[in-house]
Image: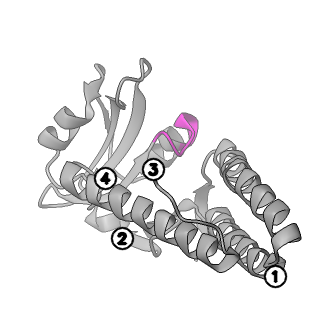
Amino acid sequence: MRMRLRVRPKHSLLGNALAAIALGTTPIFVVAYWFASSHGGVEIVGISHAAVLVAGLLVLWRQLRVYCAVTSDELIGNGIFTPLVRVRLDRIRRVMLVPTYLGAAPEPVLQLLVTGDDGRRLFRMRGNFWHETDLRALAGALPVAVEELTDPITMREFFTSYPGAAYWFEHRRPLQVAVVTVGLLLALAAAVWIMGLLGLPVRFL
């Protein structure tokens, strides 16, 4: 299978991920190591720290494997947490480049949307993760004329104008709130567990 075009996400995403891991974990574990050095439990802190770093490195490794490409007969691509998606070129009916406003950001972000016979999403790439030049190059490599919206629209208008374009986690505010809440509760439970192992008093007031 010969690839005619292959693109990768913005390099800045990798730097942001590394910075997030370093800034998010270092202060916490510095305090934990400092306390454990005089009260015992350095091994527990070390194991916890290693587990967090391994999880972070696995995410980074996965991010390095993300790409989208056009071959002689397919459009393919994957995400950090999603498997490889394959779309045969003969299934593509429309290729659209849509500028959208993300939240309160003043500059629009380009969306590449590929649909089939029923108008539903076959493939989508979001400009906040990909370079605009790569999106245009990929769209131009597909066997259908590219349609480009001239005036930016909001994400709400985007989902309304193109039903089925949203991923499962988008346009579902209750689900997003639930995921964030569960994540915070898990982080709190992990902190309480580590504090209990180190003999620290657990106080929330």
Circle nearer the N terminus (1, 2): 1
Q: Which residue is mark 3?
A: 205
- Closest to the camera, between mark 2 and mark 4, is 4
Amino acid tagged 3: Leu
Q: Position of residue 91 (x, y in %)?
A: 27, 66
- Closest to the camera, between mark 3 and mark 1, is 3
Question: Looking at the image, do the residues carrying marks 3 and 1 touch, with CB atoms under 8 Å apart?
Answer: no
Q: Which residue is mark 2?
A: 88
Q: Is residue 72 above or below residue 13?
A: below
- Closest to the camera, between mark 4 and mark 3, is 3
Label drawn at residue 114? 4
Marks counted in the figure total: 4
Label drawn at residue 159? none
Q: Position of residue 72 (x, y in %)?
A: 50, 68
- Closest to the camera, between mark 4 and mark 1, is 1
Magenta stretch? 127-134
Q: Which residue is mark 1?
A: 43
Circle nearer the N terminus (4, 1): 1
